[in-house]
């Protein structure tokens, strides 16, 4: 019985695993976490809008009805392509087929200070760290006598005008308006600044001009200051500097400005693109190894002269394709090359507005928000998560305040000379 | 306007704060966490039965409708009783009245090895650590080739036969039976051992003999091995030793065998009892300082020749009394001494059984379980938590599997010589 090893249980790996569940093949799933994470909602954990447990689902629970699928908690450290072995922190694992889908990491464009200082949003710990950071800044500001320091504690700089930066900025603005302002009556009413910085001339590069304009307008109405065409050139624990020389004093920097393929990709032979993705064959195989597939954010796939973006729907379709391709090969059938069907994109801006384009239709405002809600609930795995996420949102929508504002790790002592400590959150890994 | 400082937002402090909310006094609340924690359900977080957020409630959100109540995130480090100042990690704070209610800590009876090795369940981080530990042991066992090591990874020793130990043992047994057995088909069916060790001859010392017998019987039916009359005399990372010489090989030791007043109590002048509680006056004031009240697990209060136990209802009634006493003193009225009204006690044993005695009535089984459920839901603060906790439990009850089994902090590498690392969980503070 051929053994398929799938490394990484994100959207791509999960879909590939589902495609092989119940088949005659032995399937071994690897991930460094024991749960699948619904990444697109991490920003809601970071803004205290949804519980951690509602966007994560234990992998063993997903697959336990299928006897041919097993899971192993392991971090992939390399691949010995010559001997068909995955190298992990819990020992080497042999494979007949390998699906690599370990995703992406943040790209800092050589800005080492940003790498050290900034918060990112790649996994659950990041989201909890960022939430703790935001709430801790409010706590510190509430007892900070120096007005300049207080202002810096209440200034939140978000770098990156893609969906993550836009969605996070909107959600943070609403958290402040509907909850934190009431929680901290000792702070002046308009003392919180949320600044969204984007190096390109526009937010949301993958959307049309009118939707971009709409998104910017909505964010500004929520009180977010939008600075486009301005890359960050320097970061310090107490602020950032933009290219035009503007200095923004802030103890919180959230970096959503760049993504590159996970470092594992670098260890593989074969040509990579500018953001580290391996250039795969049209059937998603490694250029030199027929039994190794690379999918999702690790893979560079062109279609109609354009490179497919690093998005969940791309990874999911690639995962489904790879499962079918392995089954086809096992039964001696041919597969046509992978083709991505673009079903559209969305971004949410605050509590009841979004932008979306799908099947040639553009939507914005409340209708787009409803579409966003429906789609995300549909994709959240499992009945329980769907139900609870819906209730959470219904509650948050009706009452504007889900009361999840817990600081779950010890704070640095506010008495100490602690600006840097606050910025660094808990222990950053 | 007199200023009341309440240090510690557990059951006692919270109730005192509520009693003073809306009064003419200035009330300042202090806690090292920004949330009130419903301690009696921590064991459910540790057994992946309920989300963290459902048993914690942000303190600022509780009090934001009252203008006379403020909150400050601060850890109390001492009290300067002479100058009426609380010393905190965010600076000193003056008071006119002080309510000390910072609770308790684990008591290890001089067993330093236990202190280093054992998990406890005093705060949210403890609960998350313990959950991660249990799930990590299952993950490691699933790939451990050595049968002896595998058995030790799947042996869970709980020390302490009070409500916490009993409730945790029952919940863990049900987690294993209804969820983990299915999640880990690679493990042999009966390879998990849960051992509940108690130094006294009986479980649940505060209950009647028939209820104790019932509890023991129910636990044994769930597969828990109960060892009474056996104190732990030694602990190692890979096991514990009982007084009769029995060695139990286990990588997980949960210590619920002893509680003593929080260390802050030691820094106060005045006589203490055997478990470090300050012996207060009948009106809960410090023996030497009229404006300082000590309540909850920090206070030794006798009534009818018996010392009141360290339980939430005692702390809550003391908190309410202290609020009334301060208001009385401010308006020049006299207060009768504090009197505790015992409304009974309960402990839950697994999914649909409990023991309870209340108002002279003894209950056990499903009826007691329903009573337990109703009472705990009633006391869980706030509509949201109540609603969500109810839904969680309804879900868990109907489907036996709330799918919360997330390992939320990085594991020690299973490849390393890691018994000790596993035992120590993440970073223990």
Image (cartoon, coloured by chain):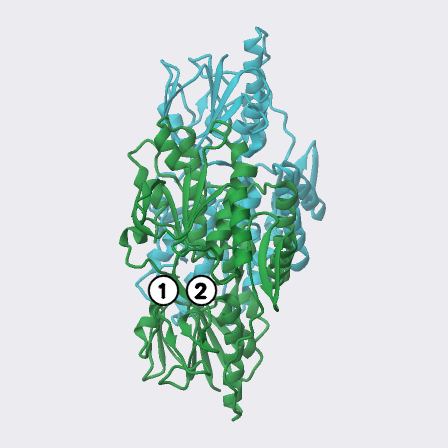
Chain colours: A green, B cyan
Classify residue A179 as left or right of residue B104.
right
The answer to which quarter of the image holds residue B147 is bottom left
**In-front residue for pair A48/B199:** A48
Q: What residue sits right under mark 1 in the picture?
A: B414
What residue lies at 60% left-to-right and 12% top-to-bottom? B336
Above or below, A315 against B152 in this view is below
Q: Please give the chain letter of the residue carrying mark 2.
A: B
Q: Say whether marks 1 and 2 touch (CB < 8 Å).
A: yes
Point out the image quarter for the C terminus of chain B: top left
Of residue A235 and residue A384, the one placed in the foreground of this image is A235
Q: Can residue B117 be seen in this view?
A: yes
Quarter residue A86 falls in: bottom left
State the residue position of label 2. Answer: B139
Looking at the rendered structure, the number of numbered marks drawn on it comes to 2
Is residue B266 toward the left or the right of residue B69 in the image? left
Q: Is residue A64 above or below residue B426?
A: below
The label on residue A87 is none
Q: Give the residue displayed 59% in from the left and 25% down from the top.
A: B317
The answer to whether residue A416 is left or right of residue A380 is: left
Q: Residues within 10 Å of mark 2 (few under 14, many from 20)?
A: many
Label located before the other in sequence (1 or 2) = 2
Q: In this view, does B336 lie above or below B207?
A: above
Residue B44: percent from left, percent from top? 55, 49
Q: Where is residue B260 in the image (x, y as percent from the top left)?
A: 43, 33
């Amino acid at each position: 019985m051929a053994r398929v090893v799938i490394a990484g249980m994100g959207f791509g790996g999960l879909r590939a695993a589902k495609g092989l569940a119940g088949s005659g093949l032995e399937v071994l799933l690897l991930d460094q976490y024991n749960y699948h994470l619904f990444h697109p909602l991490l920003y809601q954990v970071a803004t205290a809008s949804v519980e951690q447990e509602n966007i994560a689902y234990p992998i063993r629970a997903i697959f336990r009805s299928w006897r041919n699928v097993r899971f192993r908690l392991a971090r992939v450290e390399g691949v010995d392509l010559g001997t068909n072995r995955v190298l992990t922190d819990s020992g080497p694992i042999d494979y007949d087929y390998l699906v690599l889908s370990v995703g992406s990491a943040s790209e800092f464009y050589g800005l080492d200070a940003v790498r050290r200082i900034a918060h990112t949003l790649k996994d659950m710990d990041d989201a909890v760290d960022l939430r703790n950071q935001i709430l801790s800044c409010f706590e510190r500001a509430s007892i900070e006598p120096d007005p300049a320091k207080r202002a810096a504690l209440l200034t939140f700089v978000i770098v990156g005008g893609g969906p993550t930066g836009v969605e996070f900025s909107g959600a943070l603005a609403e958290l402040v308006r509907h909850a934190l302002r009431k929680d901290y009556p000792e702070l002046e009413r308009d003392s919180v600044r949320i600044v969204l910085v984007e190096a390109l001339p526009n937010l949301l590069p993958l959307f049309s001009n009118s939707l971009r304009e709409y998104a910017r307008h909505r964010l500004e109405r929520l009180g977010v200051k939008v600075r486009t065409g301005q890359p960050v050139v320097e970061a310090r624990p107490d602020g950032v500097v933009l290219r035009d020389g503007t200095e923004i004093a802030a103890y919180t920097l959230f970096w959503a400005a760049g993504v590159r393929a996970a470092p594992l990709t670098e260890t593989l032979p074969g040509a990579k693109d500018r953001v580290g993705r391996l250039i795969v064959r049209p059937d998603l195989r490694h250029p030199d190894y027929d039994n190794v597939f690379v999918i999702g954010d690790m893979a560079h796939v062109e279609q109609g002269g354009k490179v497919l973006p690093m998005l969940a729907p791309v990874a999911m379709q690639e995962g489904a394709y790879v499962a079918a391709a392995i089954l086809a090969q096992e039964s001696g059938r041919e597969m046509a090359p992978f083709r991505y069907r673009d079903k559209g994109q969305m971004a949410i801006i605050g509590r009841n507005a979004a932008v979306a384009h799908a099947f040639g239709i553009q939507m914005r405002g409340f209708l787009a928000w409803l579409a966003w809600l429906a789609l995300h609930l549909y994709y959240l795995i499992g009945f329980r998560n769907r139900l609870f996420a819906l209730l959470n949102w219904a509650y948050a929508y009706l009452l504007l305040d889900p009361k999840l504002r817990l600081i779950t790790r010890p704070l640095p002592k506010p008495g100490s000379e602690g600006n840097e400590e606050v910025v660094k959150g808990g222990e950053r890994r």
